[in-house]
Image (tube, grey):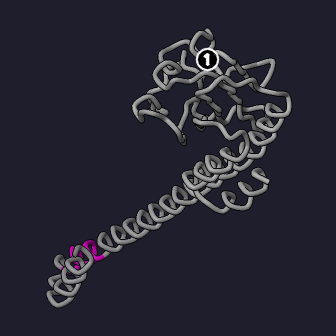
C-alpha cells in the first residue's frame, strides 16, 4: 500500500514534494524511528537532495553538498554485490564509522541503495533507537519500496532536466531572434547612411535630411 500511495502522490509533483511523499510512506514501510534519504545525481556524481524525519538534532544530518566521499551515503551507493547493508549494532559497526550513531542514539540501521537502470540514484537509511533485528520480510519490503521510489525519483529528475533544456532552448531561440533583428537593423542603417552620403555629394539636401532622419530613427 505504501508503494502504491507514493506512486499516486509524487509522480505529479516536484522533487521536494516527491521526497516528502517518500518520507511519509517510509513511516508505513518499517515504522522506524529515524529516516534519512539522500538523492544522488549519477550524471554529476554528487548528492543533490535530502529528506529525513526523527532526528534529535538537525545539525547531525549533513547537507548533500557537505557529504564526504567516506560518508555512509557514498558507501551505500558504491555497494556492488547487494543493494543493502544492515546492522544490529550501529555504534560499533565499521561500515557506519563516525559519531552519527552515538549522537542520534541509533542502535540498528538498514541502509538501501536506490538504483535505476543500473545507476545509483539515492541512499536510504532506516534507523532504530532500540535494539532491532531485521527480518528477511522487512528487508524485502524495504527493497521493494526502494525500487518504487527510485523510479519516481528518476522520473522527477528527468522531468526537471527536460524543463531546464526547454528553458535553455527558448533562451537560445530569443538570442537568435535578437541577433537577426540587430543584424537587420545594422544593415538598414548602413543603407540609409550610404544614401545620405550620396545625397550629400549630389547636394540633394531634402534627400539627405530624409536619410539622416531614418538613421536617427533606427538608432533609437
Q: Is residue 98 left or right of residue 28?
A: left
Residue 37's quadrant in the figure? top right
The residue where tag 1 is placed is 90
Element type at mark 1: helix
Which quadrant is the C terminus positioned in? bottom left
Instruction: Give the answer, above or below, for where 79 lies relative to 195.
Output: above
Q: Residue at x 62, y 30 (%)?
A: 127
Q: Is residue 188 magenta?
A: no
In this picture, which residue range is highlighted in magenta? Answer: 192-199
Nearer to me, 30 or 172 = 30
Magenta highlight: main SS:
helix
Residue 91 at x, y = what percent? 57, 14
Q: Is residue 144 left or right of residue 99?
A: right
Say few, some or many: other residues with alpha carbon within 10 Å of mark 1 (under 14 / 14 to 19 / 20 or more): many
Q: Residue at x 55, y 33 (%)?
A: 47
Residue 211 at x, y = what percent? 23, 82
Nearer to me, 104 or 176 = 104
Residue 157 at x, y = what percent? 63, 48
Q: Residue at x 71, y 30 (%)?
A: 112
Amino acid at each position: 500500500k505504501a508503494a502504491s500511495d507514493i506512486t499516486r502522490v509524487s509522480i505529479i509533483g516536484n522533487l521536494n514534494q516527491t521526497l516528502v511523499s517518500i518520507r511519509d510512506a517510509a513511516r508505513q514501510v518499517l515504522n522506524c524511528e529515524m529516516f534519512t534519504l539522500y538523492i544522488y545525481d549519477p550524471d554529476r556524481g554528487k548528492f543533490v537532495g535530502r529528506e529525513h524525519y526523527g532526528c534529535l538534532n538537525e545539525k547531525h544530518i549533513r547537507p548533500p553538498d557537505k557529504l564526504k566521499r567516506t560518508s555512509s551515503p557514498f558507501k551505500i551507493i558504491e555497494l556492488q554485490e547487494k543493494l543493502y547493508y544492515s546492522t544490529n549494532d550501529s555504534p560499533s559497526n565499521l561500515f557506519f564509522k563516525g559519531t552519527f550513531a552515538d549522537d542520534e542514539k541509533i542502535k540498528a540501521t538498514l541502509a538501501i541503495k536506490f538504483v535505476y537502470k543500473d545507476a545509483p540514484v539515492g541512499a536510504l537509511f532506516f534507523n532504530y533507537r532500540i535494539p532491532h533485528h531485521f527480518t528477511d520480510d522487512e528487508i524485502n519490503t524495504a527493497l521493494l519500496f526502494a525500487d518504487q521510489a527510485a523510479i519516481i525519483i528518476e522520473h522527477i529528475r528527468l522531468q526537471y532536466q527536460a524543463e531546464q533544456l526547454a528553458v535553455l532552448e527558448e533562451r537560445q531561440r530569443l538570442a537568435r531572434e535578437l541577433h537577426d533583428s540587430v543584424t537587420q537593423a545594422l544593415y538598414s542603417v548602413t543603407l540609409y547612411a550610404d544614401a545620405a552620403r550620396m545625397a550629400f555629394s549630389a547636394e540633394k539636401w531634402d534627400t539627405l535630411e530624409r536619410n539622416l532622419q531614418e538613421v536617427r530613427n533606427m538608432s533609437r
